[in-house]
Image (cartoon, rainbow, N blue to C red):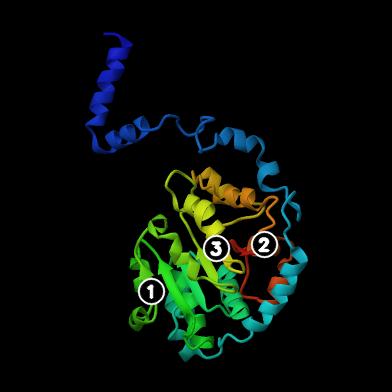
Amino acid sequence: MSQNILKRGIKILLKKMPYCGKIIREREQMAHLPGHFYSPYPLIEDIKLKEKEIFESFSNEIPSIELNESKQLILLNEFVKYYQEIPFDNKDKMDKLRYFSKKSIDNNNSYGYSDGLILYSMIRHLQPKKIIEVGSGYSSCMTLDTNELFFNNSISCTFIEPYPQKLFSLIKENDLNKIEVISKKLQDIPLSKFSSLSAGDILFIDSTHVSKVNSDVNYIFFEILPYLNQGVYIHFHDIFYPFEYPKRFIYTGVAWNEDYMLRAFLQYNNAFSIIFYNNFLFRFHEEKFKKGIPLIKKRGSSCWIKKL
């Protein structure tokens, strides 16, 4: 019996086994396996050869992108004032909230203080009339808490989330009478939905982080951002500095690429400006965060930009 016939026979048998069959069928759908130069998954051996250069060599400048470091520091000083106005000393009030309740704090590992307190501060600073959030959960809780505590629920809030079960489990029952929840994929939402955002309003984005055919990320960069009105602020989550993912992501098979998309988008782009870049600013000014907003103990991963 030839080796080829033997291999085909073994493959047929393996395909009949549920777990092995699933893996084989998935691999057969790929033109190129992870690590191939045509695959979005890198070859780990190549990455390890340049590990220090990729993951440890940082400068506070990026060619062709204005990071606005001094302006970010001025804004951080403004945020210190808002931090001092959170009623942390009122336990009864805090436990009735969504983001700040003990239950949420104990279970929130997706949008912690490093990003949440900046979202709170940005809402306080901008005083938007409308917020559209793409990708909902604990960030939605922070938005609703801020709206309730400081704006008497006057901010119009829309949440676009195709899988809203987590959101529904976190918010109050009567919240559904005050907000709009759209349980659809972002790319199925007409562009006209975003025309309601005016100068000073917020488009909050926490996407799938992957650019590919018919993806939400492509829809954001190619359709939504060019369509927005001037003066709208845009939040991206899981954006690391210097527009590169952490080593732990790469070595565990996370092949996101939104970080790279945003870097390419901002290069030589005079129509959008970086307003606040958590991961960047904390990396170079950690002591200012610890002094002014001590609950921020590590680098967040939000990047705020504005359409000019």
- Gap between marks 2 and 3, in whole Å? 16 Å
Looking at the image, tell me whether mark 3 or mark 1 is earlier in sequence order.
Answer: 1
Q: Do the residues labelled 2 and 1 touch (CB within 8 Å)?
A: no
Residue type (three-letter) at the residue carrying disc 3: Leu
User: Callout 2: 10 Å neighbours few (<14), some, many (20+)?
Assistant: many
Residue at 54 percent of width and 30 percent of height: 37
Q: Which mark is residue 228?
A: 3
Judging from the image, what secondary structure is the residue with disc 1 in? Answer: strand
Q: Which residue is drawn at 67% across and 83% down?
A: 81
Q: Distance between the residues labelled 3 and 1?
A: 20 Å
Which quadrant of the structure image shows residue 240? bottom right
Residue 208 or residue 64, whichever sits in front: 64
Residue 84 picture quarter: bottom right
- Which marked residue is nearer to the observer: mark 3 or mark 1? 3
Depicted 213 relative to depicted 272: above or below: above
Q: In this view, does 210 lie above or below 145?
A: above
Q: Quadrant of residue 250?
A: top right
* Labels 2 and 3: the sequence-earlier one: 3
Q: Is residue 237 above or below residue 3?
A: below
Three-letter code, disc 1? Glu
Question: Residue 180's mark?
Answer: 1
Instruction: Give the Cα distance between marks 2 and 1.
Output: 28 Å
Q: Mark 2 points at which residue?
A: 274
Report the side of 215 relative to 272 (left or right). left
